[in-house]
Image: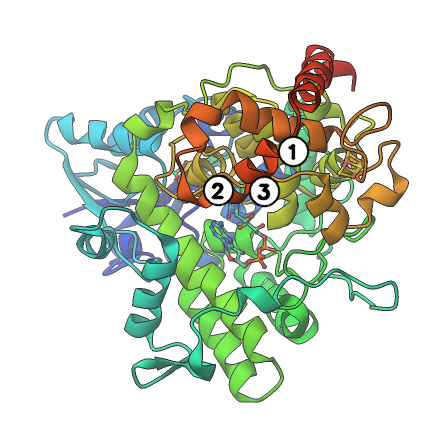
Amino acid sequence: MKTLRLIMGDQLSRNISALHGIDPDHDLVLMTEVWDEATSVRHHQQKLVLVLSAMRHFAESLRNESIRVDYIYLDEKNNTGSFSGELKRAIKRHQVEKVIITEPGEWRVREIIEGFKTTPGLQVEIRDDNRFLCSQAEFTRWSAGRKTLRMEYFYRWMRRRTGFLMNGSEPEGGSWNYDSSNRRALTKKLVIPPRKRFKLDAITVEVVNLVEKMFSHHFGDLESFGWAVTRAEALEALQDFIEHGLPWFGDYQDAMKSGEEFIFHAAISPYLNLGLLIPGEVCSAVMQAYNQGSVPLNSAEGFLRQIIGWREYIRGFYWMYMPAYKKTNYFAATRSLPSFYWSGDTELNCLRETIEVTSRNAYAHHIQRLMITGNFALLAGIEPSQVEEWYLIVYADAYDWVELPNTHSMALYADGGLLSSKPYAASGAYINRMSDYCSECVYNPRLKLGAGACPFNYLYWYFLIINEDRLRPNPRMGLPYRNLDRMSDEQKYMIKQQAEVFLAQIDSC
Ligand code: FAD
Ligand code: DLZ
Ligand code: SF4
């Protein structure tokens, strides 16, 4: 039977389920650049270059194995611009009877793919995505009967299942989690090695020209593009991180510093999410470095937790709660996203630094995403769908399955606590402790009120005041509310006043 194997832009793994059992004599791979995906949101220009260049390189690598690939370019004359349109054309062109697809990573695209099943005379086989360590069925089994789905318990379950950092049934070193030793601030003396970046080859240059021509109105700089676009390069980037970043990853996981873009983070999420790297191989490389003694336990454990814990948990969580949960808005937040999220033009230095680095690299590390742009959006009551769209646009690693739970649930607590037991809300004191941003800021993180007071301070208390009915009953919010209770009515009144004046002029702050 003549079979078409559809490979989408974030499915660039040779071992992906859709390619299993491929018969090069009869089967054909379809890869298609489509307008609908390129414009589903106004993706950062670097993200477009990364996806399209990685797709073109992947097609080339399949052809080098004598696999037939029908590759449709974005600017081709007859390109219909959609997955369904291109699949229909390909079925006719090649007289195909069967289509094999790996399940897509996004609800919206999953619905499109399900729609293929109604095509008369066409067999459609949707296979599980085999690139995760925990399948959806296994996640559902783990979650059965649990009142809340907390990552920490999922993570312990995954440690036992994978055997990573386990001594029999006990965690290596006696503790499951070394997060408390992962909160050091950077010192001036510490030298941070640059992360591996890559030169543009002819294929990437061609894509850059295309993106400059068609998408120059999208967010972000293109000049600094340095992402890996092939598996070989992605493996090099992983090795570079393991040697030069991982040993310090644990200690400085939460630290932020002006001008330091990647610190000791891996910057491999774009590769994992495209399929250029596979989580199992990343964990094995970490374990090898740990077993050789070149990486301390807090780094190995902290990093593994991100991959086998957070990443897998987030994916299970997405499919468990979609699509209804996307619409929740626990704090009834309605404010529009401030324009400085696009321009970086703000006096709040921590926000400016984070937005500028995001524009330059289509990357910011977790704490910048969570505790700077995310925390501000939470405290300022920005409408969740606008914040989510921003995150989906600006990061090279952003796909709905991973961006949505991180933004909607972790950063904005818009689901009311499905993912975390309390909101990640913080005042300027946290940002001052974990970064050097405040020393270059017009505001003072030590001032709670009045001229020059850090806006994160009064917005934090304002957030507690206006959401008291929802948050005070939460046992984990006891301490902040006890601190609020120590304030006089006059202080609370002044906090409200200053916060409301700030929020009324938020676009020009
Ligand atoms: P490292 O800090 O070096 O961590 C290693 C790897 O662990 C990452 O590459 C990533 O694959 C995985 N990981 C770590 N934390 C998470 C997490 N919370 N969820 C899923 N995987 C995780 N990550 C994305 O991949 N895509 C997104 O669109 C995305 N949006 C986010 C939005 C917000 C508001 C927040 C708070 C976080 C978001 N994250 C997202 C998670 C995390 O910030 C990024 O995975 C991480 O910054 C990627 O950089 P890194 O490779 O240097 O990560
Ligand atoms: C992100 C993206 C972009 C920008 N362009 C394409 C494309 O032209 N063709 C394609 O197959 N995939 C693209 N992608 C990735 C898809 O959006 C992704 O595969 C789906 O959202 C499923 O997760
Ligand atoms: Fe950000 Fe406040 Fe520090 Fe300025 S003082 S950098 S606004 S936390």
From this viewpoint, which residue is outermost toward the bottom?
Answer: 292
**SS class of the residue under badge 1?**
helix
Q: Residues within 10 Å of mark 2 (few under 14, many from 20)?
A: few
Please give left or right for residue 106 compared with residue 27 in the image. right
Judge by depth and name the residue closer to the eye, 78 or 158.
158
Q: Residues within 10 Å of mark 1 (few under 14, many from 20)?
A: many
Judge by depth and name the residue closer to the eye, 498 or 202.
498
Q: Quadrant of residue 156?
A: bottom left
Report the Cα–Cα distance between label 2 and label 3.
Answer: 22 Å
- Picture residue at 33% right of the left edge, 44% below the top: 317
**Which disc is residue 45 wearing?**
1
Judge by depth and name the residue closer to the eye, 268 or 444.
444
Percent coordinates x, y for residue 472 in the rendering: 45, 32
Whether disc 3's CB lies below 8 Å from ligand 1 is answered: yes
Q: Amino acid at mark 1?
A: Gln
**Which disc is residue 370 wearing?**
3
Q: Are marks 3 and 1 in contact (CB under 8 Å)?
A: no
